Image (spheres, grey):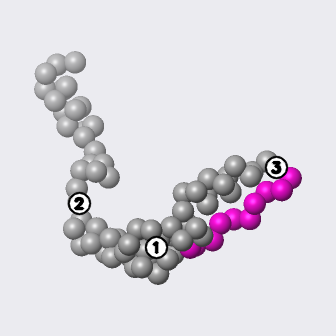
């Protein structure tokens, strides 16, 4: 491959990824939604999810965890 052909090939191979740009307005909106979820106790703790997943494959499978289980959101405040 010649120098100019190689340059043309690499120029076409450059693709913007998810991490190349940022949208400050979208990020602020997502942060506000997350903070509202924390304030409203709409989170499921890691411990609750872990316990639920460990029950998979057993006869006494645990029910799906619900928001607010183990009061995890209160511990973040």
The residue under label 3 is 58
- In this view, the residue in front, 18 or 8, is 18
The residue under label 2 is 22
Q: In front: mark 3 or mark 1?
A: 1
Q: In this view, does 16 lie above or below 73?
A: above
- Residue lying furthest left: 4
The reply to whether residue 58 is in sight is yes
- Report the residue at 22% width, 68% height from top: 24
The residue under label 1 is 74
- Report the residue at 58% width, 57% height from top: 47
**What SS does tag 1 mark?**
helix
Is 65 contained in the magenta span? yes
Q: What stretch is highlighted in magenta?
A: 59-68
- Report the residue at 19% width, 25% height from top: 6
The reply to whether residue 26 is in sight is no
Lower position in the chain sequence, tag 3 or tag 1: 3
Quadrant, the C terminus: bottom left
Dot 2, how many residues are within 10 Å of its Cα: few (below 14), some (14-19), or many (20+)?
Answer: few
Lower position in the chain sequence, tag 1 or tag 2: 2
- Residue lying furthest right: 59
Q: How many marks?
A: 3
- In this view, the residue in front, 46 or 23, is 46
Q: Specify whether 19 is left or right of 52.
A: left
CA–CA distance between discs 2 and 3? 44 Å
Lower position in the chain sequence, tag 2 or tag 3: 2
Q: Do the residues labelled 3 and 1 touch (CB within 8 Å)?
A: no
Q: Where is residue 33 in the image (x, y as percent from the top left)?
A: 38, 76
């Amino acid at each position: 491959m010649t120098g100019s052909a190689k340059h043309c090939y690499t120029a076409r191979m450059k693709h913007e990824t998810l991490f190349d740009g940022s949208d400050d307005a979208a990020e602020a909106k997502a942060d506000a939604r997350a903070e509202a979820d924390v304030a409203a106790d709409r989170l499921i703790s890691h411990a609750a999810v872990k316990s639920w997943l460990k029950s998979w494959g057993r006869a006494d499978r645990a029910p799906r965890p619900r928001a607010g289980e183990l009061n995890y959101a209160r511990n973040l405040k």
